Image (cartoon, helix red, strand yellow):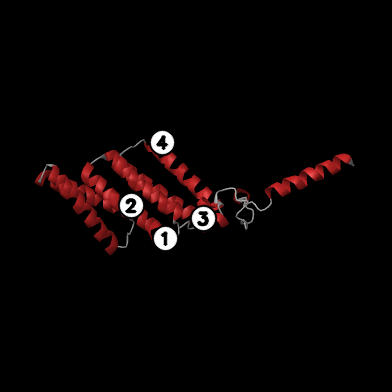
Amino acid sequence: MKEISAWNSLERGFQAKFEGHHLWWLGGPEKTSNRNTLMPESVWHLVDEKFRKNPRPFIVQSALASLIVFLTLWILEFMSPVIIAAIGSTVFIVFAMPKAASARPRAIFGGHVLCMLIGLACSGIFFYVMPDKWGEILAGSLAVGIAIFVMVIFDFEHPPAAGTALGFALGGFNPFAITFIVVASMVLSTVHVGLRQWMENLV
């Protein structure tokens, strides 16, 4: 009996210690008292309300995004900063805004491939017409403008793809970059189709 009583006292003490805390990682109820917050109130009010209510999709979808990027970079072994930045932005849309129009496979794959071709065309033209610094500047700026125009009129709206156009306009023909864009956009399109029904918009 003494052992049971001691255990009950310990349990009540533990409950009293953590009463009122917002144990969001355990799916507990949202905290109602400011005095017992595990995070300073000055910081806590900056946290998105959707995260405070249900942090699980934020954690899971962010982890999946990291996994997909890791596997893509590891398998393809391609490290062009501009092109990778464009794909990184696509990863954000796929996992943070899966219900958005720009997350559609048509927009992801079509947008990146279309903008890749536009960037290559601009690079090729200005390489022969104006093979100097100004040629690169004009190629990059026109590639982005044309990419935006073409994506909008053909319903391929995918903002990160404008970065793909810029990357190819400045970098020119690169078979490894072409392979990376095509494969990465296909993988992300497939992932979106397979996981969309289980993912939520985080923004």
* N-term mark: 2 or 1: 1
Other residues around mark 1 within 10 Å, as few (<14) / some (14–19) / many (≥20): few
| In this rendering, position of residue 3 left or right of residue 25 | right
Residue at numbered disc 1: 100
Label 3 and label 4: CA atoms lie apart by 38 Å
- Residue displayed at 41% across by 54% down: 93
> Given the image, on which type of amino acid does mark 2 rest?
Pro
Q: Do tag 3 and tag 1 residues touch (Cβ < 8 Å)?
A: no
Q: Nearer the viewer, residue 139 or 26?
A: 26
The answer to whether residue 116 shows anywhere in this view is no
- Residue displayed at 33% across by 37% down: 79
Q: Position of residue 6 (x, y in %)?
A: 83, 41
The residue tagged with tag 3: helix, strand or loop? Answer: loop
Q: Position of residue 108 (x, y in %)?
A: 36, 54
The residue tagged with tag 2: helix, strand or loop? Answer: helix
Foreground label between 3 and 1: 3
Residue at numbered disc 3: 45
Label 4 and label 2: CA atoms lie apart by 21 Å
* N-term mark: 4 or 2: 4
Label 3 and label 2: CA atoms lie apart by 31 Å
The residue tagged with tag 1: helix, strand or loop? Answer: loop
Question: Which residue lies most toward the bottom here?
Answer: 153
Q: Which label sits on residue 74?
A: 4
Residue at numbered disc 2: 160
The residue tagged with tag 4: helix, strand or loop? Answer: helix
Label 2 and label 1: CA atoms lie apart by 14 Å
The answer to whether residue 94 shows anywhere in this view is yes
